[in-house]
Image: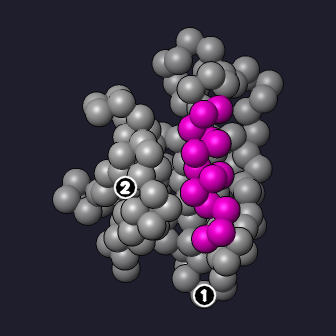
Amino acid sequence: MGLTVFVDKIRPVVRVLQWFLTPTETVEFACGPLITFEAEEFRREGVTFVRQHFKQYKTRRLRREEIVPVFVTRSERNLLENQRAVRVQIVDDPPDTLVFTPLEIRKRSLNGLFPLPAETERNLTPHAKPAAFWKAFNEALAATD
């Protein structure tokens, strides 16, 4: 999966959940805590943050003791109210392509996130300029309205 980006519908806040593979590369786990950005800060630093995450994603493997559960408590699950969500993942065909998948939040848990139809996804080539990144992200985010 890579990343799940939550954009608050009311406040100018963006939260990012990172995902990493286990050492066997068979299971991907959400790795808390959530990283919080002010919306303007995310617009300034988001492209760099995403690219750095995927550099780490290729080599970092989570051990069981590193896994920090997220959306466990009621207050954490309440964070999912009034949010829009986009999954950002990297695929190998073509290599290092970013895929932005809009998500529907049906329940306040990670199991309650469901991808919208494939035609709402946006792909981005590895060395795309920041303007292309934001165009793809914004189009995927708009599909969640």
Secondary structure state at the residue bearing disc 1: loop
Which residue is rendered at x = 67% and y = 77% of the image?
40
Secondary element at tag 2: strand
Residue lying at the far bottom in this picture: please name it.
Answer: 10
Q: Position of residue 73 (x, y in %)?
A: 74, 57
Amino acid type shown at disc 1: Ile
The front one of 102 and 50 is: 50
Q: Eyeballing the image, is 137 above or below 66?
A: below
Taking depth in this image into account, of 26 and 134 the one nearest to the observer is 134
Position of 81 with respect to 107 (left or right) is right
Residue under numbered circle 1: 10
Q: Residue 111: give x, y in percent of width and height.
A: 48, 49
- Name the one closer to the observer, 3 or 56: 56
Q: CA distance from mark 1 to mark 2?
A: 21 Å
Residue at 73 percent across and 46 percent down: it is: 32
The quadrant in which the C terminus is found is bottom left
**Quick check: 56 left or right of 135?**
right
Chain part drawn in magenta: 43-56
> Residue tagged by mark 2?
101
